[in-house]
Image (cartoon, grey):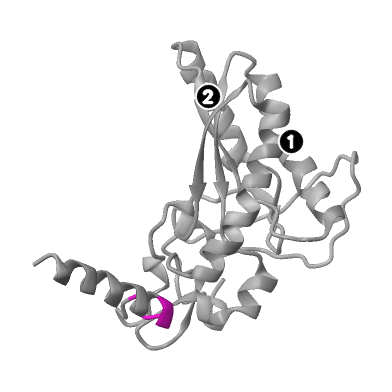
Amino acid sequence: LRGNNKPKRTDFAWDVQVVRPHLPLVAGTRYTVRFEARSDGPVWPLTSYLMRSEPLRFYAGQDPVDRFNESVTLASAQGANLLALMIPRIPWTDDEAEYAAEMAFNHAAIERTLQQFPDTDLIIRFGVEPSAPWRKAHPAEMTAWESGRTGRYVCVTSQKWLTEMGRRVPRFVHDLEEKWGGRIVGYAPAAQSTGEWYYPIWDTVNGEAMNFSSGFLRAYRAYLKGIAKGF
């Protein structure tokens, strides 16, 4: 990547990605991926193969699956038999076929983990960010930068999002409990940047701040009024 093709930002491993659109994958088929890369300086490539569009799918790669398994193996050898398994996002659809397909993928991830680590119990860390169609339909419910630019993540004070999440999470948890209840000891919802509930500071432009969405400002003003009543 040189000259005009050089990306504006290369601070993070995912800033440069090779994308091949509309590549069909057949279930049960083994694929071999080969590529060549050259760098003028030291780099650490992440060899992961995934579908970047909704719903996100991780198929293969050294990171994060291999490192996750290696870490769990080391921990299990020391008697630590509790791990957090990440499910990228709960099914955010009212289509029953789509919901069933999403849950089948989630069940398979849990089954695969427990087969590999049969003495381990799980904490399910699950994403609660809304789907791409929902975000597009509700831009006012998303975060906003100081300049007015819409952010990539939902605003946590959005009542529409909270209501929608409150409808979808119970079914998701119920379906997991019905099959894996004896092995799941807790749940941890995840949202915003890296699923850790903080703003994507690397997306800032010229140091602009976040969050300036109308919904967040309303909620923050109400919070301040509540504090003022206590004085």
* Image quadrant where one finds the N terminus: bottom right
Image quadrant assignment for residue 174: top right
Packing grade of label 2 (10 A; few <14, some 14-19, many >=20) is many
Amino acid type at mark 1: His
* Image quadrant where one finds the C terminus: bottom left
Label 2 residue SS: helix
| Image coords of residue 208 (percent x, y) | 32, 81
State the residue in front, 28 or 62. 28
Please report the residue visible at 60 percent of the width from the left and 33 percent of the height from the top.
Answer: 66
* Residue that badge 1 annotates: 107
Please report the residue visible at 57 percent of the width from the left and 51 percent of the height from the top.
Answer: 127
Regarding residue 27, the answer to whether it shows in the image is yes
Q: CA distance from mark 1 to mark 2?
A: 19 Å
Give the left or right position of residue 58, taking residue 142 as reference: right
State the residue in front, 137 or 29. 137
Majority secondary structure in the magenta region:
loop
Label 1 residue SS: helix
Please report the residue visible at 61 percent of the width from the left and 73 percent of the height from the top.
Answer: 135
Residue 72 circle label? 2
Please report the residue visible at 61 percent of the width from the left and 37 percent of the height from the top.
Answer: 65
Quick check: is 213 in the magenta stretch? yes
| Image coords of residue 159 (percent x, y) | 50, 69
Regarding residue 211, the answer to whether it shows in the image is no
Query: Which callout, 1 or 2, points at the residue further toward the start of the chain?
Result: 2
